Image: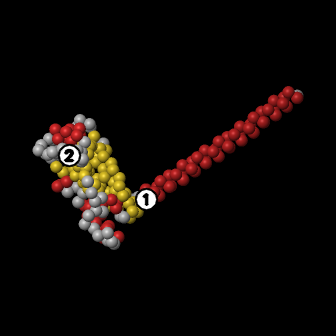
Amino acid sequence: MIIRNNKLMILLFSIVLFSCNTTTKDLNKSHVVKKTNEKNEISNKQSLTEKILIENKIKHAFSNPDKLDLFQVYLKGESILKSKLVFVITNYNGVVLLKEEYSSIDLIGYGLDNNASNKVQEEFIKKRIAEFFKEDNFSKPAIKFDSEFESNYSEKNVWDDIKSDQTAIGFDYLIGEEDGRSIAYSKKFKKVVEFYGCC
C-alpha cells in the first residue's frame, strides 16, 4: 500500500513538473515571438520613413556591348536634403555590378551660391538627378586609343586593361564639387573598375 502510494506521489510530482516546464517554455516562446514582432515593426517603420523621393533610371549597354544593363540613381529618406543618394548598376542578368551610397547634399557642387535657400538646393539636386545619365556621360570606347595615362588619376593596370578593350563602354559621373569618376566594366577582372578619378 505504501509502495503504491509512493508510486502515485511520484507520478503526480512528475505531472506537476512537466506542466510547469511546458508553461515556462511556452512563456519563453511567446517572449521570442513578441521580440521578433517588435523588430519587424521597427524595420517596417524605418522602410516607411526611407521611401524613394526621386528616381532616374535608364537601360544602357555597359558590361556587354550587345546587352542593356540597368542604371539607377535615387534619393531615399525623409526629405531631399536629408536623404541617401543611391547609385546602382545591375547587369542584364539581374546581377548588381555596382552600388554606391552618398549623402544627397554630395550632389551640390559648383554653380550654387553658399547661402542658397533649401528650396534652391533641392532644385539643384533634382536637376543633378535628372541629368545623371545624359548620353554625353557614356563613351565608347571608354578610353580612346590616343589617350595618355596620368599616374595621379589612375592605376596603370586598370588603365591598360580598359584601354586595350576598345569595346569597353565608359561612364562618367560627378559627386560633390570635384570628385569626378570614370568607370567601365573590366572583362579581365570581371567587375566595374574606376579607370580615372579626378580631382
Q: Quadrant of residue 161?
A: top left
| Residue hosting label 1 | 48
Q: Position of residue 190 (x, y in %)?
A: 26, 37
- Is 130 or 193 nearer to us in this picture? 193
State how far apart marks 2 and 1 are (Cα): 46 Å
In primary-sequence order, the first of circles 2 and 1 is 1
Position of the N terminus by quadrant: top right
Q: Residue at x 67, y 43 (%)?
A: 24
According to the picture, the residue beneath numbered tag 2 turns out to be: 150
Image quarter hosting the C terminus: bottom left
Three-letter amino acid code at disc 2? Glu
Relative side of 62 to 146, left or right: right
Q: Is residue 72 above or below residue 17?
A: below
Within 10 Å of disc 1 (Cα), the crowding (few <14, some 14-19, many 20+) is few
In the rendered view, does 2 fall on the left or right side of 53? right
Amino acid type of the residue that numbered disc 1 sits on in the rendered structure: Leu
Q: Is label 2 in contact with label 1 (beta carbons under 8 Å)?
A: no
The residue located at (35%, 64%) in the rendering is 80
Q: Position of residue 149 (x, y in %)?
A: 18, 44
Q: Where does residue 60 sit, x and y in percent of width and height?
A: 20, 49
The quadrant in which residue 29 appears is top right
* Observer-nearest of 176 and 30: 176
Q: Is residue 30 left or right of residue 62?
A: right
- Label 2 crowding class (10 Å Cα cut-off): few <14, some 14-19, many 20+? few
Residue 197 in view here? yes
Mark 2: which secondary structure? loop
Helix, strand or loop at mark 1: helix
The spot of residue 133 in percent (x, y) is: 22, 55
Q: How many marks?
A: 2
Q: Residue at x 29, y 70 (%)?
A: 113
Tell me the mark number nearer the camera, choosing from 2 and 1: 2
The residue at the far left in this view is 146
